[in-house]
Amino acid sequence: MMSIANIAEAQSITGQVTDSTGEAPLQGAIVSIEGLNRSVSTDRYGDYRITNVPSGTYSIIVDYVGAETVSNLITVPETGTTADFTIGADTRFLDNVLVVGSAAAQAGSINQQRAADNIRSIVDSDGLGNFPDTTVADTLARVPGLSIVTDQGEGRYVSIRGINTDLIATSINGVRTPSPEDRRGVLLDGVPSDLLDGIEVQKSLTPDLDADSLGGIINLKTISAFDRKSQFLRAKIEGQWNEITRELSPKATFTYSNIFNDNFGVAISANYQDRRIEAHNNEIGEFDFDNGIAYLNDDYEHRWYDLTRERFGLVANFDWRVNANTDLYLRTLINNYVDDEVRNKFEFRDLDDSEETEDGGIIAAGATTVPLNEVDAEVRVREETRNIQTIALGGSTSQDDWTFDYEVSYAFADEQDDNNHDVTFRFEDIQDDFPGTVTFDLSNPETPRISGTQSLLDAVYNPSNYDLDGLEREFSVNEDTEVSARFDISKESLLGNTPITWKAGVKFRDREKTRNEDFLFFEPDLNLANFARDSFIDNWRLANPQPTWPDPSLTQSLRSFNNPEDPDFDEESSFFDSNIADYVIDERILAGYAMGTFRFDKLTLVAGVRAEETDIDLEGRLVAEDDLSAIVTQFSDNYTNVLPSLNAKYAFNNKLIGRAAYYAAVVRPAFGEVAPFVEVNDDRDEAAVGNPNLDPFEADNFDLSLEYYPTELSVLSVGIFYKDIKNAIYGANFDIEDLPANIDVSNIPADLLNGDEGDTGEIEEISTFINVDDSEIFGIEFNYVQSLKDLHPALDGFLASANLTLSESESTLPDGREVPFRNQANTVWNVALGYDKGPWDLRISANFRSNNLDELIDPELDRTIDDRMLVEASAKYKVNDNLQLYLEGKNLTDEPEYYYFGSDNRMMQYDEFGTSWILGARYTF
């Protein structure tokens, strides 16, 4: 046994673990010294370092799931030694990585998960290409415990264990990613998975990680030249065909990496995609609930979206191994996303004005006949540009038992809606000239049917009956910038025969979030007959006749309305809406931590504490509409959180691992919740306001899990988790007389709070955000991965995987009402079956997410996202060692997306996107 007194006599063993060719480094291999309590796992470059080893001869054992265990005798002199290992003599080699395909993805993920000191899930670099994923969110939907929210059929937001995207953290190479929207959650539909080398999902936090996550941290890892040991060059090209658009959308990716002079690495990856999307949509604006009956009391809409999403991404990473002790790096990512969208809307308005039905509304079930008063035909032409940029400069220096890590980073995101226009034509007072009735049949809530008096319907579909109601021009920018710096120091030591890693560090983050919206409103005298489409849309998928749409190519001429001197310019409304929602937020976080990693014989403990001090300054505007003036208003807050953490890992044997974890977390309110903004509706009787008095989420998080690795490429795991959450934030609506005292409405103009209804308007209802007392989430996770040849030799090449997350949640609102935690899906599961042998790699998978609460409205009418199951498949064929062809299918069952009010027979939104097919080729030089 070695004592603290003779540590100085100990040496280090360093080395690298690669595949059988010596070309592909393997991450997650466990390297141990037989007879000593020493074991480490290899990093992403396959490197390992074992310190405090006395001089002598030892048997070094390397264990990697998917390959035979390797052991070699190593003599350690007084100066230390280097020992490299190659494993997997029977593996195939392609693309400079170990077994490209489904088997490689399983092997890489299993090994990294097994070696981790905390609870995490891994998507290995090979796993990124196993399915037809357009975005990073699509990929993450198959990770145990994760689910996604889609937009236009593409994965956009990710939740971990039902915790929504605003309450989890997203990083790129460890650098916190800002959000181009007015929230903290990061849009992942703009980031193509082809730019990444792997994804880590950390479900329990250690003290050296930022503590601003209730669900966990998603870390997107980009490529490095040292991921391989020689030059690498790959090109990928594909086309995607959708049954609705009936067009081929191109996509191309190029990746290059090389190492110069054995110590300087360059890795570059570029990606481009131009994808056309069409969506056919029904929407209902609002329901009322009275005497057990729900009444449609607002509007019913047909929508048709025609958009093109253009994505460009560039990664350029540079690594310099200065000497044996110091590594430096520069990591950069540029991501550009352009959403060029035309939204056509045909809206049956003010249905609550009808006098023919009880309470003036249309009953939600069955068919009801009513007079029709008002219809809108609208087109919105929008070009939204989003950018995400990250730059990180840092390094690591080791000296004896000490390691110093340092990094400065810059991250920027913005969202620009520049030169957008929204044109609305209105057919009003219909009953005066066209008496008659219309029947709304909501028997099938997803696709309601409309019928009625023919002369009335003819008038509704006649464009000459629609006069321009308003022209809106929008120029808006959201920006989010974060600059951070961190310094970490760690020391390897021994207590008896127990290795201990002591670690401490500091980090400073300075973040600025701004929103600036500018509007121009005009009311020229125009008629839809001069702007209507002269032909119908191909492949119309909804039940009712295709409406009369304004033609976006003709309404483009209305962009000439941009002069505030124009006699049709609405100066007061333009000034009001251009100022009242603007804000600036400056947030500064200073953090420090101390922790220790204790590696006993079978038990590993990671324990420590982190402290974070938050300073936040908020700036909004008080707008006076009558004299066109705006006054800056300011708020500020400061608080400190002390956040302990403990992760335990116990190896019962080399196949069975138990884990337990506790960590405290703090999540600051979303910017759009805490910002001192005001948004007022057109009738000036409702307002939405931010709440600068919100407290941050605070949570105690507990995990317990068991992992069993029975055979090669197999794992069976089960885990339970519990989260005790304070100060959860929900949106809430209040009548003005019932508004809580801590809701600040000082930014609402006095003439709107106290005005005369019908003149300037008078605010009657406030929508805002509130803290609730207590919330709880409890869940259980199952994960199963199996190489089926272990069950029978005839199944060689077959792979199966399945995971299931079941959870229950509860939040108590101020009025005592108990609701599920926001966006908490109680059931999430994935199943996949694959075949990977010879030239073929085949996969079919299904992903399911149960319904979940999206927005609080009323106990019977809360906005809910319906459950959804997506089925996908892929077939890949290796022509030779360089060329691979593939065919993939997305949304094979043509699953729609559906939102409803409280019950699934009260439709809020219904979208169809169709099935897509992808044909492509990948060539490695």
Image (cartoon, rainbow, N blue to C red):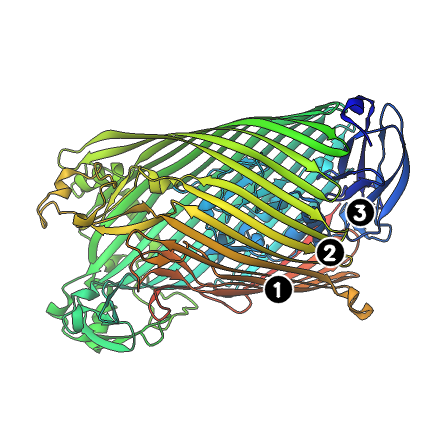
Judge depth for marks 3 and 1 and give the one in front: 3
Marks 3 and 1 sit apart, C-alpha to C-alpha, by 28 Å
Q: Which mark is residue 701?
A: none
Instruction: Look at mark 1 in the image and give the residue it sits on.
Output: 831
Mark 2 secondary-structure assignment: loop
In the rendering, at what x and y percent does residue 293 appear? 25, 72
Residue type, mark 1 in image: Val
Residue at image position (27%, 62%) is: 286
Instruction: Look at mark 3 in the image and give the residue it sits on.
Output: 63
From where the camera sits, is residue 463 visible?
yes
In the rendering, at what x and y percent does residue 731 appear? 32, 50
Mark 1 secondary-structure assignment: strand
Residue type, mark 2 in image: Tyr
Judge depth for marks 2 and 1 and give the one in front: 2
Side of 781 relative to 306 (left or right): right
Quadrant location of residue 283?
bottom left
Q: Earlier in the sequence, mark 2 or mark 1?
A: 2
Q: Earlier in the sequence, mark 2 or mark 3?
A: 3
Which corner quadrant holds the C terminus?
top right
| Closer to us: 230 or 740 | 740
| Closer to us: 442 or 787 | 787
Q: Residues within 10 Å of mark 1 (few under 14, many from 20)?
A: some
Side of 451 relative to 330 (left or right): left
Residue 913 against residue 721 in the figure, above or below: below
Assess whether mark 1 and mark 2 are in contact (beta carbons under 8 angstroms): no
Q: Residues within 10 Å of mark 2 (few under 14, many from 20)?
A: some
